[in-house]
Amino acid sequence: MLRMLSLALMLCLMVPTTAAAQTLQDILQTHQDEVLKPGRRSVGVVLDDLVASGLPQALPFLEAWRDREIVQLGSDGLFYRAAEDGDAITLTDLDTGEVFTQVDDADLTETRPNGGVRRAIGDALVQFQLSDPDIAKRRTAVDAIARTMDASQRAPLIGSIDGETDPVLKEIKTRLAGMLGALFAETADARIVAINDLSGDLSVDVRGVLNTILATDAQVAATVPDGANVAQVLVVGTDLTPTEAYARLVVAELAPPLVTKSQIRDALVTNINGDEVGGIPVASLDTDAGRALAYDMLAGEGIAPPRVNETAQADAIAAHTFYLQYAEPNPAITDAARTALTDIETKVAMSQAVDLGLDALSLASIYFLAAIGLAITFGVMGVINMAHGEFIMMGAYTGFVVQQFVPDYTLSIIIALPLAFAITFGAGVTMERLVIRHLYHRPLETLLATFGISIALQQLAKNIFGTQARPLTSPEWLDGALVFNDVIAISYIRIAIFVLALIFLTLILFVLKRTRLGLEVRAVTQNPGMAASMGINPDRINMLTFGLGSGIAGIAGVAIGLYAKVTSEMGADYIVQSFMTVVVGGVGNVWGTLAGASLIGFLQKGIEWLNPSNTLAAQTYMILFIILFIQFRPKGIVALKGRAAAD
Amino acid sequence: MRKSFLAENPSVLWFIAVLAVFTVVVTLLSEVTGVGLISTSFVKTLGKTLCLCLVAIAMDVVWGYCGILSLGHFAFFGIGGYAIGMWLMYARTEGIVIESLAGQPIPPTSAEVSDAIGNQIFGVVGSSEFPWIWAFADNLFLQLLMVVLVPGLLALVFGWLAFRSRVTGVYLSILTQAMTLALALYLFQNDSGLRGNNGLSGLQNIPGFENTSQAVISVIFFIASALALAAGYIFFAWIVSGKMGSVVKGIRDNEARVRFLGYHVESYKLFIFTATAVVAGIAGALYYPQAGIINPGEIAPIASIYLAVWVAIGGRGRLYGAVIGAAFVSLLSSWFTGGGAPDINLGFYVVQWTDWWLVLLGLSFVAVTLFFPKGIGGLFDLLVRKQS
């Protein structure tokens, strides 16, 4: 602020000079002494003149000055920028950029700005950079301020806001100025106003600023001093343990330090006298009690400092108050900051809940996609297909192979989706014809046989594609995320998967409820014999249904491959969850699968939220929950009633 | 007058006789007697195979006789291994720690010893505290009790929950698989208290036998495994041949009918499930000291499914079938994946069995399920029929 004032003063006083000073050299010549031997005070005059001149060459000059590269040539008294080049010294004219070579350095006087002066120059530089015509430089300067958050940057920042042409950068500058104001405004009232202005902002920076204002020091004293801005008085036993409390007393030098076990040990070892220490035989030092006894002997002889016993510790703790004190002395400011922070945190928590809901929704749609094919083969046909996961894998690898031939990612996905369906449909029909058809009345055998196929397919994929994960690159328009605010964001891929899941739900419901095929499928499901006598070919229907379920797994594979890595084991990762989804939801019902996927998705995200560091644990607890859930609703969420429910 | 159990089951005698001869022959040919025709590592492989046969018998009883396709019995096997592994690791580390602390000028306190052991064991997962599940690790007897109790209790609770709500068939299979997956995922965590995916290692060094050579230890474990297999075989043969066996087989064939006859089906199933789990735990406790290392990957659901594969290939519903299946497939598997089988050069492609063995296994498994539901054991029926 002082500098702003002096700048105004200078402008009034030195109008003739400034008007006449056309070149940088002129300004520098006017202030020869200040440039050569700048002092903390005198440098302000030069800087203000430079800033006022608005000369573009002033910026490189300031940088050079700060970096001690400016010299004065004795012969003409002019200032140059010097660079050492071997023995020779090159001088650069500050205005024209003309280069001279000077061999003799005796004629040169170096300028030597000290630390304080260089800091002042740095501030002036910031101001220059903040008003630089190049937007990239302005952005860099703003970023630098956001990183350091220094009080001195506030004035130049505010000064540059009005002249800012870019609306986005202006917004950023205003926000930054608000944060700096909350931290460094001159009066308490101004700071409180700035703090209140921050309370609508959910960003991490703002929370960081408020937390900086609310930073506390752990203090201990016999009584809380008057006028201390106390955040909280700590209760020993609830807020901190007696051990921690005593440790703080020791740090504050209000109590003698404890003698630790290793100190006791060291003291005993250094004082071994023959085969005893302090009159106690060494052999009996294998318990803490024995060692304490020996140490007390040493302490009694004055060889070692005495131990602080439990009562003394308790007394010392009881005689003192432990409290947290704000670094900020003004309670009005900390109150305002706390209110603002609480307000922000409430909003952040709400946003996080929404974000968690979105995450859960996208996880649920992935599970739904993975399980819907299974819901058809297992749920509708009653055939358990352990190779379902491998069909998902086949779909994903189809996508990968297509991308090897079609480099355009959008086009390749469009090709891969139907191709994956076709391939897995074919695989499913082949499997049904060759294996499953013979095992319709032996469900456990179906499980084992399809498991054999699963092993073989998995190893086959490993042999063909190798063990390393293969990328399935998503098209560019699926990159990035939909950002609602600083907390809520959802990536476009997840939205796409959600949409895909919705499409599948509609499609399958349509096929099952509104088409001839669906009618026949439902007829065969309910009573194959009766359906056959009505002229439906159950063999054909079973084959088509199985193919449909497998084909959907293939498409799900492409979608999952976009979101996760494609490996030969990716199917195995989803198979148990898919079965869970179908079983929890209720077998034989597409709505049930939807309910199951939602339950499992939301449950898993919920558990992860409770224990964020550990997704493995989340899965463990989720499976345990499902095992228990099956106890209470053995038929799943959406249970079939009546005859259809009979096995 | 009922005939005696052994007279009714001549196959038990046959089995015991074959196993005894096999054990004696292997012992005589091992490096211990100086013959050395069978290397120590192969003795270990054979011993491990016997343990696998034992767990396969358990699987056969629960699946082939009782009709419960459990995909969780290898988890019980693994739990048994972990239980014994905890003692082995603790006791061995304790020995090492005490030895290293013996050089200190003053004797260590028990707290110092326990801290040092904790550091040694849990250093890899960034901890040094002993989790509560290690409370009995210093006591061999209690830890042996854990080998039996932990799988038994887990099976009891799980089985009680599942059977009482009438979860049957494929649902039960999936539920057991979920249980296995949950257990494996839990053990994979670093803070599970069992060293995360590092697992427990160095189990081949038996505390108190530091000066005994691995050759001797391997033979001792081989004989112990053979004894356990014999005992397990007799125990299960006795169970499935008596009146209880008839009820159990009845449950397999038609659960509802047995229930209507007045039998408490759930109790029978629960007993079979728990008893087989305990035997699986014992088999695991014998297996892992020979394997030397156990980690959560061993418990993964796939292992339990392989167990079902062995039993299916060997022949369900007959105990020797399970033994044959487990021995045949696991030995063949280690022969193929260990690079023992010669590559086949097709001219345009070289079939390397390390890569293609699983494909072959998977497909042959499908073939067995489709065409030989009785497995290898079914061949014996053909022999018997020809003779009569």
Image (cartoon, coloured by chain):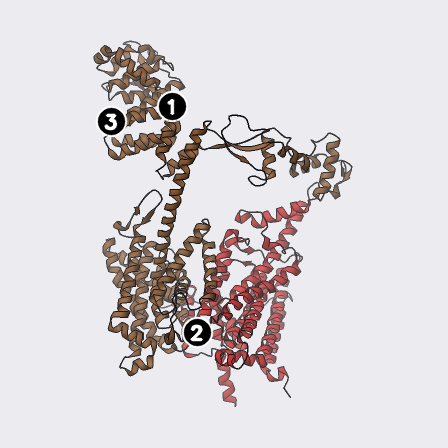
Please give the label number shown on residue A645.
Answer: none
Q: Which residue is mark 1?
A: A186
Residue A17 visible here: yes
For marks 3 and 1, give the CA distance: 23 Å
Residue occupying the far right of the picture: A279
Task: Nearest to the eye among marks 3 and 1: give it.
Answer: 1
Chain shown in red: B
Callout 2, which amino acid?
Leu
Chain A: drawing colour = brown
For marks 3 and 2, give the CA distance: 77 Å
Where residue A565 appears, as percent x and y from the top left, is 36, 55
Callout 3, which amino acid?
Gly
Where residue A137 appears, as percent x and y from the top left, is 28, 30
Q: Which residue is mark 2?
A: A444
Q: Secondary structure at mark 2?
A: helix
Depth check: give the residue in front, A184 or B252: A184
Please give the label number shown on residue A163.
Answer: 3
